Image: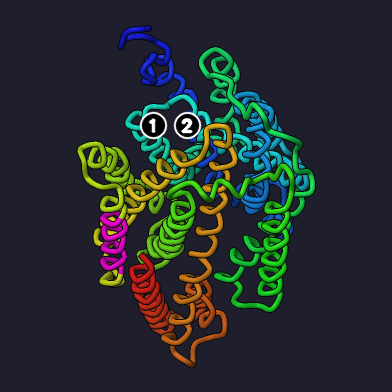
Amino acid sequence: MTNSTSTTTTAAGRAGRREWTALGVLMLPLLLVSMDVSVLYFAIPAISADLEPSGTQQLWIFDIYAFVLAGLLMTMGSLGDRIGRRKLLLIGAAAFGAASLTAAYANSAETLIAARAVLGLGGATLMPSTMALVRTMFTDPGQRAKAIGIWSGVMTGGIALGSVLSGVLVQYFWWGSVFLVNLPAMALLLVLGPILLPESKNPEPGRFDLLGVPLSMAAVLPVIYGLKEIPSEGVHPLYVVSIAVGLLFAALFVHRQRTAATPMISPALFRGRGFAPAVVLNLLSSFAMMGSAFFTTQYLQSVLGKSAMEAALWALLPSVPIGMAAPMATQLVQKGVKRAHVVAAGFTIAATGYGMLALAGTDSLWLVLVACGVLASGIVMVMSQLTDLALGAAPVEQAGAASSLLETGAEFGGALGMAVLGSIGTAIYRHEIPAGAPAPARETLGGALAVAGRLPGRTGETLVAAARDAFTSGMHGAAVAGAAVL
């Protein structure tokens, strides 16, 4: 038996310094994968000027990463359980680093799109592998809860940090620098990973479900595509059909998993106490988080008139309480408060944040920032506890599959939140905007601001004021709906 200062897991099942150091190494790829969701926010104008992509190519440069990531999460989670989570993590890190280097020096839009697709593939290997390795390294429930709390905080913080970092790098360097920052972290992971991270996999995985791979992608990608397009383009028949096709393939995928001898996602996972509710409630948490982001980012820039960089820097302030939310939730549970009560409190706190958003006017910077902090803190409390519950309920040998289900659900929830709440806000905006406004102004706030710039004197100012009022009213309606869901 080793003592409490050991650098390896003790006989009592408690992790030592080695595992906590390994957790720090695991946070590197997690931070970068989450940052890459938002790292192009400020780089797109520079990329457009340099590579001159078409409108369609520009959309794919931005979206292909998230599409590939969402589509391959379940495949990679299941693959990691079979070949080894550390092995898959290191393969993904190498692919992520190589794709980052290619993207940084891409000389055409096609090359950049391809590199972003490979980045999504690498991200799909890294995310479930990091969570599954946390599950296998930290077998003590208290330590695992703390580690997952750190995981949740880093994941949430990375999305906010990505946009700010890209703004700073693009301002002082060239757009390719937003990808080069990935290289040192991935190199460090490739060096330290084999030393610090234990290998773990399912000892009896069975044959890999090859048919499940295309079925899972055909289920996820059309739904994510349709949900992502609806907030900006409206409920177009193409997007409704896309979602319907995805749901059809989802039914086929579920049937395949229930009848296959060795399924990609074992139905037995859902018999674990609390696993299925945790996946569903985690999806609702992402619904609330991304649904609010759809409005608050536009509010800071288009309603308050902040530049993109100013908006990103202001948006960092709510990250301060977010960093304390998950550890606080873990402490409460470890001191004897029922997890169900902590989760319910987190949802209540988040709903309070939405309630504060419903009170914002067209010049309420601090109220909106505080509302964002309250909302996100509540959501992080919930997510950290639900993640711990789901992973604790899943067998260790299926930790990768369990992790990938949580993360795929989160991707669905985020897209659904933007679609549903975004559609509510857009409908209210179009109802509130004056009937005599130009057609682009009746569609979106961005369209109103663009048109107003070409109108003379008071006419343009009146249109801007009306559009900002209408958008804020739309945000109020979406906030009330978000609060009701929570």
The verdict on residue 107 being magenta is: no
Q: Residues within 10 Å of mark 2 (few under 14, many from 20)?
A: many
Q: Which mark is residue 431?
A: none
The span from disc 1 to disc 2 (Cα, nearest Å) is 7 Å
The magenta-colored residue range is 344-357
Q: Residue at x 75, y 43 (%)?
A: 209
Q: Are marks 1 and 2 in contact (CB under 8 Å)?
A: yes
Assign a secondary structure to mark 1. helix
At a point 38% along the width and 68% down the height, the residue shown is 485
Taking the spot 28% from the left edge, 61% from the top edge, the residue there is: 353
Q: What residue do we see at 48% from left, 46% from top?
A: 272
- Colour setting: rainbow
Identify the residue position indicated by label 1 in the image.
Answer: 144
Element at badge 2? helix
Give the prevailing secondary structure in the magenta stretch: helix
x and y percent of residue 241 in the render?
71, 73
Above or below for 383 versus 448: above
Q: Amino acid at mark 2?
A: Arg
Q: Is residue 348 magenta?
A: yes
Q: Which residue is mark 2?
A: 135
Residue type of the residue flagged with mark 1 = Arg
Q: Is residue 251 above or below residue 111?
A: below
